[in-house]
């Protein structure tokens, strides 16, 4: 093989010609630098967000199907405060008008108080017909006209596409009313809270419904019937619910490495009648079941559970101490010798 000899003058000229190109390429490489690789944690977060959006999409698709397939509401459910007009076609003297009282009854001629709360207009008509038939009329025909709708409202709040107050005219279940708000937002959690008056209006009760159990596991019994006056709240994902004997029960956003003790502090702390030795942490396990952990907030050691790091959808419930409730509920009657008892609020 013949060697090729390059003169020094030619080599110098070649270097001068190529130097700007080499310099430009080097500079571009320096500016671009090594491309950063995504961290494992970031990838996992994105995957979880994608899974969450997919779950929300699945839930919203079912809500839409529920709304499309549900028959239109045809009859109004009577409730407290509704003004109704009752007509008995066989006797004009029995025609009356009245409001459904706090005990759920309306007063009618000859019959007196008749419980109608929770009945549809049609069901109430049949009931009143039966009552008149039993004592006064052979074949009565009754018609009910609702002149003022008072009880037929529900409130949808939280991570919903269209939260607000909606008319509630007929019996519907949870998925039906969530469809009224056009479904959940991408940030919605899976645990829906249904707040209901109950027998004591000053102590409303809260029902927790896991949408995953309905959608993924087919537990249709959790698709509970909604009542007029209910407040349906869908918290954002990344929240914990604190209830029971705390000063401000409700949903709270989980801060980074939030503990049980910190969550209770966010809820205003324990109330006067709290049993700090009897606190429950309810957590959704990986297999879909609910785990209940017994905690002791009185004990400052690690075994107490007070420093357990919280997860999305955890529920903390503080029990009421019976003796404390009795002590704070006692009162001395002024004016005569005697004692009384006022049940204290769990949130005092």
Image: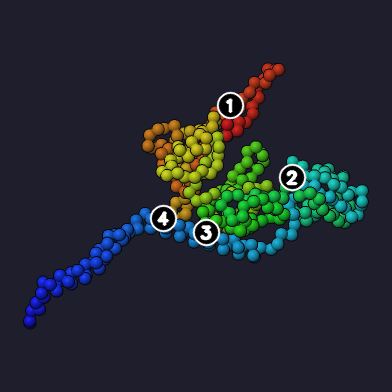
Residue position for label 4: 45
Q: Is residue 124 left or right of residue 12?
A: right
Q: Mark 3 Cα within 10 Å, few/some/many (few <14, many 20+)?
A: many
Residue position for label 2: 80
Residue drawn at 29 percent across, 63 percent down: 28
Location of residue 15 by image quarter: bottom left
- Mark before the other along the chain sequence, 3 or 1: 3
Location of residue 41 by image quarter: bottom left
Residue drawn at 10 percent across, 78 percent down: 4
Work out which residue is located at the far bottom of the displayed protein and give it: 1
Asked whether the residues under the numbered discs 3 and 2 touch, taking CB atoms below 8 Å apart as contact, a structural biologist would say no
Residue position for label 1: 328
Q: Nearer the viewer, residue 34 or 220?
A: 34
Q: Nearer the viewer, residue 89 or 77?
A: 77
Could you give the CA–CA distance between mark 3 and mark 4, rounded to whole angstroms?
A: 16 Å
- Mark before the other along the chain sequence, 1 or 2: 2
On residue 56, the disc is 3
Could you give the CA–CA distance between mark 3 and mark 2, rounded to whole angstroms?
A: 36 Å
Asked whether the residues under the numbered discs 1 and 2 touch, taking CB atoms below 8 Å apart as contact, a structural biologist would say no
Residue 115 placed where, x, y %?
Answer: 77, 46
- Mark before the other along the chain sequence, 2 or 4: 4
Residue 275 placed where, x, y %?
Answer: 50, 33
């Amino acid at each position: 093989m013949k060697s090729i000899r390059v003169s020094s003058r030619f080599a110098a000229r070649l270097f001068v010609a190529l130097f700007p190109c080499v310099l430009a390429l080097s500079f571009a490489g320096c500016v671009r630098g090594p491309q950063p690789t995504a961290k494992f944690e970031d990838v996992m977060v994105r995957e979880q967000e994608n899974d969450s959006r997919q779950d929300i999409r699945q839930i919203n698709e079912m809500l839409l199907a529920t709304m499309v397939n549900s028959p239109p509401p045809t009859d109004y459910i009577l409730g407290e405060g509704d003004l109704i007009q009752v007509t008995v076609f066989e006797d004009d003297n029995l025609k009356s008008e009245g409001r459904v009282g706090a005990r759920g009854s309306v007063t009618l001629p000859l019959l007196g108080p008749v419980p109608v709360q929770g009945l549809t207009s049609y069901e109430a008509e049949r009931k009143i017909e039966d009552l008149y038939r039993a004592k006064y009329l052979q074949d009565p025909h009754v018609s009910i006209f609702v002149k003022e709708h008072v009880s037929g409202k529900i409130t949808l709040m939280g991570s919903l596409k269209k939260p607000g107050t909606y008319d509630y005219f007929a019996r519907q279940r949870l998925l039906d009313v969530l469809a009224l708000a056009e479904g959940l937002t991408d940030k919605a959690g899976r645990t829906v809270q249904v707040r209901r008056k109950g027998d004591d209006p000053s102590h409303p009760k809260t029902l927790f419904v896991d949408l995953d159990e309905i959608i993924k596991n087919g537990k249709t019994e959790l698709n509970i019937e909604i009542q007029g006056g209910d407040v349906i709240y869908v918290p954002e994902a990344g929240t914990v619910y604190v209830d029971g004997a705390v000063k401000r029960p409700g949903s709270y956003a989980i801060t980074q490495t939030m503990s049980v003790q910190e969550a209770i502090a966010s809820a205003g702390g324990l109330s006067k009648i709290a049993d700090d030795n009897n606190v429950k942490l309810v957590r959704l396990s990986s297999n879909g079941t609910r785990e209940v952990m017994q905690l002791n907030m009185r004990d400052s050691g690690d075994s107490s559970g007070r420093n357990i790091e919280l997860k999305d959808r955890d529920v903390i419930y503080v029990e009421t101490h019976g003796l404390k409730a009795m002590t704070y509920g006692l009162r001395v009657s002024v004016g005569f010798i005697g004692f009384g008892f006022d049940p204290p609020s769990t949130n005092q």
